[in-house]
Amino acid sequence: MQCLECGETIYQLDNGHLLNCSSLTLQEYAIRHHLPLDMILHSDQINLPDHVDNYSRPVARPTEAARQTLLGLRWSGLLQERDAFVEVPGEVRRLDLLLWALDYLSDYGFQFHQDYEYRADSHRVVAKNRLRVPLRNLVNEWATPEPPPAFLGALAVYMAHVAEWHAGYLFMAFSRPIYAESVREQLARDFNIQCQQLKLSDSSDELLLRTQTLADGIKLLDLLKSRLIAIPTAWERFKAETPQASVTKELVFDSAHFITDHPAKCSNLHGGRYVLQVEVTGRIDPVTGCVVDYGYLKQVVNQLIIERFDHHHLNYAAEELAWRSSTEMLCVYIWEQLIDYLPGLSGIRLYETTNSWCDYQGRTLAEQQAAGSDPVLHPFKNLPAQAANRKRLLNKFGQSTVAACQVN
Ligand SMILES: [Zn+2]
């Protein structure tokens, strides 16, 4: 076959040849020339086994930078135990980030692999980039590392791998609540940067931190800027100028409700299927190719809205809706629930029937933080302003229960 990079005719294309002629891996070559991997690979390059004997034990104590890298990856949940190994997966677009980490993690004996695996479920050969090390090489770091690696170094590694930037806020998902809590505490104590904890699911351990205000997000990026610029594919994720796009997720819920004082049938208890469309606008992350992950969008709307409303009575599912569960009030309520998790929220549309719907654009997260929940949702929150007058009039002319008792 002919190498499409250098034109040379070779028996079998492999990473050895490609590295010399173009610095590419086979997976990148396949994408660059839009060829399926199956067309390039020979069967003896697929499903290769690995063995711990292929790895040496670390000879010296890993450097501080290596320990920071390992800790940052631990926070991110990217260190995964598999059989006798620990692996760090890396997407093809982040190959240089994976190799950057390898430069430090080689202290522990990590090696880079681009594995080609035939996946029966996807009917094709897929490539997986991984750093891999025998579990035995990490036992000394696996318990509580002493002394703890420097915080900011580990945080930069963590951020480079998993943090996301949405509408001026940093989102950081942690594999365990204890890591999230420790990062939140240290940022508040040592750098006066506040983060809010967001819970994504009752069943999973995963915990999400979001910088509290716009100022906190800027402060955190400034704090780590020089470190992130030095890490491949890190800084561009937060700051590169890329096109804006809007993405929408549609979910449905079946609910009952009534409209208090409605002059027609809507004052009766009735049910229906609501269709909710949630739109988020933002810049396309150049490394993920997405504005926001549809899976995250669905998880947030499910957790905060669908779980609450589906197969429930809207007037009693939220105190804000007790008086008026109209589509308009529902939209204001839904917006306020979602904005903490989706600060790029740009519009919601709620269908009550196929030909009746409401469109709504609410306030930004910063505006909501400054002003609190919209008063339109809380007409019964305060006691009547006319209390004294009300008492006078009703005592004088009303049919009070006290009067009724006295009559009887
Ligand atoms: Zn070549």
Image (cartoon, rainbow, N blue to C red):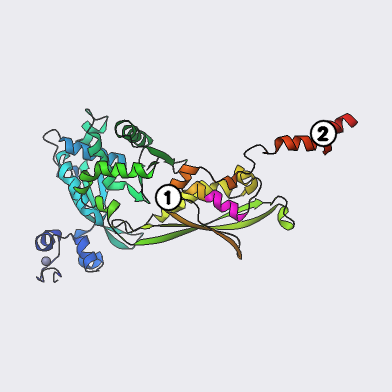
Residue type for callout 2:
Thr
When the figure is inspected, residue 199 is found, relative to residue 296, above or below; the finding is above
- Residue at image mark 1: 343
Residue at image position (61%, 42%) is 319
Task: Give percent across and percent down for residue 26.
Answer: 19, 61
Residue 89 vertical position relative to residue 273 in the rendered view, above or below: above
140, 286: nearer the viewer: 286
Q: Which residues are magenta?
A: 326-334
Q: Report the image quarter containing ligand 1.
A: bottom left
Residue 200 point in image, percent of width and height: 44, 44
- Assign a secondary structure to mark 2: helix
Q: Which residue is mark 2?
A: 401
Left or right: where does residue 57 sit relative to residue 242? left
Tell me how far mark 1 sits from mark 2, CA to CA.
Answer: 50 Å
The reply to whether the C-beta atoms of the residues labelled 1 and 2 are less than 8 Å apart is: no
Provide residue 183's location: percent of width, then percent of height.
32, 35
Secondary structure state at the residue bearing disc 1: loop
Which quarter of the image is occupied by the N terminus?
Answer: bottom left
**Residue 271 percent coordinates (x, y):** 66, 55
Q: Residue furthest right?
A: 408
Q: Amino acid at mark 1?
A: Pro
